[in-house]
Each structure stands twice: as C-alpha cells, then as structure tokens.
Image: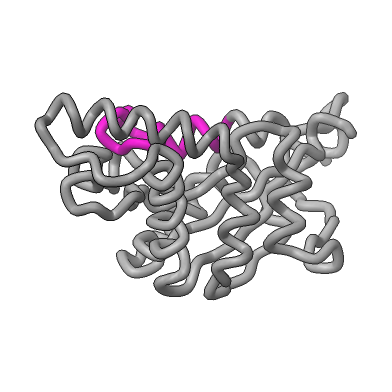
Amino acid sequence: MHPKKERTLVIIKPDGIQRSLMGEIIRRFEMVGYKLCGAKLVVPSEDQCWKHYNKDDAWFLRKGNGIIETRKSKGMVVDKEPIEYGKDIIKGCVKYLTCGPVLCMVWEGNEVVSIIKKLVGSTEPANSDVGTIRGDYALDSNNLSELDARGSVRNLVHCTDDVSEYEREMSIWFSPEEIISYRHIQEAMLYDVNLDGILE
C-alpha cells in the first residue's frame, strides 16, 4: 500500500456528539489534508464494542491487579477478583459507547494513523497537550472516572492506535462497500511529484 493510501478509523464518541463537536473535530482532520472515505452515524451494539476493544484475560488481569493496588493504597475495599476489575473497565467503555449515537469515520492520507493520533491527544485528557482535541475540549480524568465508578474516561474520540489495527477495527464498523475510493482535488498539491498543471 502506498503511504498516501494509509487509512485510519476514527469514532466521535457520544460526548463529542452531544457537545456538538463533530464539525470541529472533522475540521481539524480536513485542515491537515486528510480525505474522508467513509462516515456513518450509528448507535453501537454491545457486541460491536466488545469486538472493538478486543481485550484478553491477560489484559483484564494486568489492569485488575493495577486497580487492586490503587484501591489498597487509598484504603478502599477490594471485593472482586483482579479479572473482574479488569473487565469492569471494558464494561464501562461499552456502556459509554452504547449510550447514544457515535460518528464512525475512515480517513485516508500519508501517516494518517500517527498524525490523527497526535491531533487527538493522550487517552487521559489531563495528559493531552493544548492544541489537541482532548487537550482543548475534554476535562474528564482517570481519577474522576474511578471515583464515579464509571470505568471509562469521556474523551470525545477514538482513533486507531497502530496501522496494523486498522483492518480489524474497520471491519467491525464498516462493510467494504461503505468505504469510497475517490480522487480529491487537493491531492495534486499534497502528493503530485512534479507539481505540474498548476500554472496556466
């Protein structure tokens, strides 16, 4: 695959929809020069979400043990096995993602996975730089999520973490026919080797 054809999945989560941030989030990706190849508004199913997060027992145990350590250090009660605490994280994410519509999108362009990930910011908004989507528009935190026993941070957007993950994630949210390949007029400026055809 040519680098300019790299694709990524982006999901504007329910808080992004409810806070009317869709246009601003899309604008940021368009301003970089990325091309939108698929988009649809859906209410996710629980099954889609569990497939999307794609965690195994080793992940649940690792996260659950971390939660138990944190709870003990804060003098909180530990009343579950580590694996159950780990599963609670994804249960919270599933509850959050299925509470209302989300906007699923496929974006295309050179280094799209890493650049969009940088534009979105860190998973926890408090650690996201000013200028990122989460740094500018999200105020939730792991600490608040934990105190409220939500299991998920409301951080506006999901984006693919790694190029190798795109195909798996995309297949959960889109059929191949829903992804459109087309030529965008700005691609001549972004990718044309000789820049011919600009001057009359």
**Which color scheme is applied?**
one colour
In this picture, residue 13 sits left or right of residue 129? right
Quadrant of the image occupied by residue 78? top left
Q: Does residue 140 appear in this view?
A: no
Please identify the quadrant where the C terminus is shown: top right
Give the residue drawn at x 43%, y 57%: 91
Q: Is residue 37 magenta?
A: no
Q: Where is residue 106 in the image (x, y as percent from the top left)?
A: 68, 53
In this picture, residue 176 sits left or right of residue 60? right
Q: Position of residue 155 (x, y in %)?
A: 36, 48
| Above/below status of 65 relative to 185 | above
Query: Depth check: 111 or 199 in front?
Result: 111
Give the residue drawn at x 81%, y 61%: 180
Magenta range: 115-133
Quadrant of the image occupied by residue 18? bottom left
In this picture, residue 141 sits left or right of residue 116? left
Query: Depth check: 130 or 117 in front?
Result: 117
Give the residue drawn at x 47%, y 73%: 101
Q: Is residue 119 magenta?
A: yes
Give the residue drawn at x 42%, y 33%: 63
Quadrant of the image occupied by residue 67? top left
| Above/below status of 175 relative to 27 | below
Q: Which residue lies furthest to the left in this view?
A: 75
In this picture, residue 182 sits left or right of residue 146? right
Query: Depth check: 29 or 174 in front?
Result: 174
Please identify the quadrant where the N terminus is shown: top right
Query: Depth check: 148 or 125 in front?
Result: 148
Q: Position of residue 165 (x, y in %)?
A: 71, 39
Instruction: Give the total of numbered labels.
Output: 0
